[in-house]
Image (cartoon, rainbow, N blue to C red):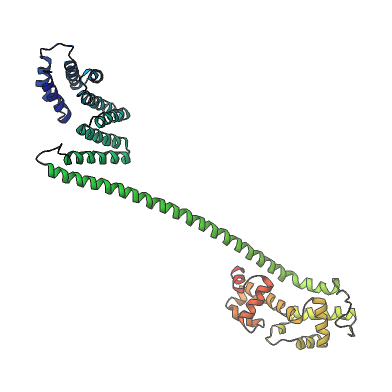
Amino acid sequence: MPCRTPFFDLVLYATFHGNDTIFNKEKQEIRRLPIPDSTAWLQYARLLCDGIDAWVAKDRGLSTACFEKMLASAEKLPPGVKPTARIIARNYIHIWHVDSARVDNAIAAMFLNEQDAKGHNLMVHLMDSYSSLSLLYKIKGDDKLADKYYIRYLETKDELINSKRLANVGEAELLFEMQKKNEEARRLAYERKVQSWVIVGILVFTVVLLLMLYWLYRKYRQVREQKQSLYDRTQEMIKDSEQKRLLIAQLTPKPVQEKPKYENSSLTEDDKDNLMQQILVVMETSDDIYAENFSLDQLAQLVEARPNHVSQVINEKYDGGFYAMLNEYRIKEACRRMNDKAGFANLTIEAIAQSVGFKSRSNFSRTFKSITGLTPSAYQKMAPK
């Protein structure tokens, strides 16, 4: 084929230099070759020349038509050069697609070049295909695929160097530069992976933290509502207990037992009711009950009755013993004092406990919680400011 030498000179210039003005001599030589116009090589070469001229003249439609005909005419060439001819034609079509913002079409053309290059072991063209794919994906903004094909480009280039297919004076420098770029690409890929792990970890931690905070908030609300309910109940007890205790003696007489504890007592029911009312008056109005050593005998003296009669009436009318009733009234008074910030703001819980007759804070706290359902400190925090 007499046109093969100028033809390959032309395509080598076109592929590696990218300066259309330096093809003039080769284009003239090809057009003057004395061979039949029907020769496949000549048709392919002239279409390439016509396409380049149209491109320089900015006639994109004509240039694209020439390059597409050039791709079709490559099928008429000998099998040994047919893949290379197809790849060169697609390279020019790829340039037109990029210039026309048809990046996806350019990518499709480069994938075909990759297949041809792999199938016929055209390592230089395979390397160029990967380089073009890396640039095209970077134009699309897909850094992951851009990095993928850039690494393949470097690996192919490295393979060319190792197999002595790419030899030149600066081979050692090129190898060093490729290794640096390869390491940098891998480092960047690793950093992206680490960043992804960190982001996933942060998101998981945030979700877990939010769930824990939500659970703690729900528990806090439940406890707060329970405490508020107990506090409100205690307030109702403080407000209503006086009236209820006065009505107990009149409205709820003690049922007759088969063997009454006080069957030999000389008290009539009227006597019991009257004595209970006197006891309630003392419990409601006298500060003596808040004395630390207040006893059943002292209560009996205040109501001018015998201790055994006072004990009998409390057990029958109150439904509890003397100390149970005394503790309830003392705790109610402690609640009143905690509510009274003006009068008792400076008192500690220990001081309030002592002021209503308790000898120790532990006994006071235990009794307070058994009656109100709250600890003294919790009640104090909920009391009006």
**Image quarter in which the C terminus is found:** bottom right
When asked about the image quadrant of residue 338, the answer is: bottom right
Camera-side residue of 38 and 50: 38
Q: Nearer the viewer, residue 303 or 61?
A: 61
- Horizontal and vertical percent position of residue 121: 22, 32
Give the image quarter of residue 21: top left
Give me the residue at 34% from left, 51% from top.
194
Q: Is residue 85 left or right of residue 205?
A: left
Residue 145 is left or right of residue 156, and the answer is right
Q: Quadrant where the N terminus lies?
A: top left
Q: Is residue 60 visible?
A: no
Residue 351 in the image, given as x and y percentages of width and height: 60, 81
Front-most of residues 62 and 121: 121
Measured as percent of width and height from the top left, residue 336 is found at: 67, 74
Up-down relation of residue 164 to residue 188 (above or below): above
Residue 24: x, y in percent?
A: 11, 21
Looking at the image, is 355 positioned above or below residue 340?
below
Q: Can you tell which quarter of the image residue 185 is in?
A: top left
The residue lying at 51 percent from left, 58 percent from top is 213
**Residue 205 is at least partly visible in this image:** yes
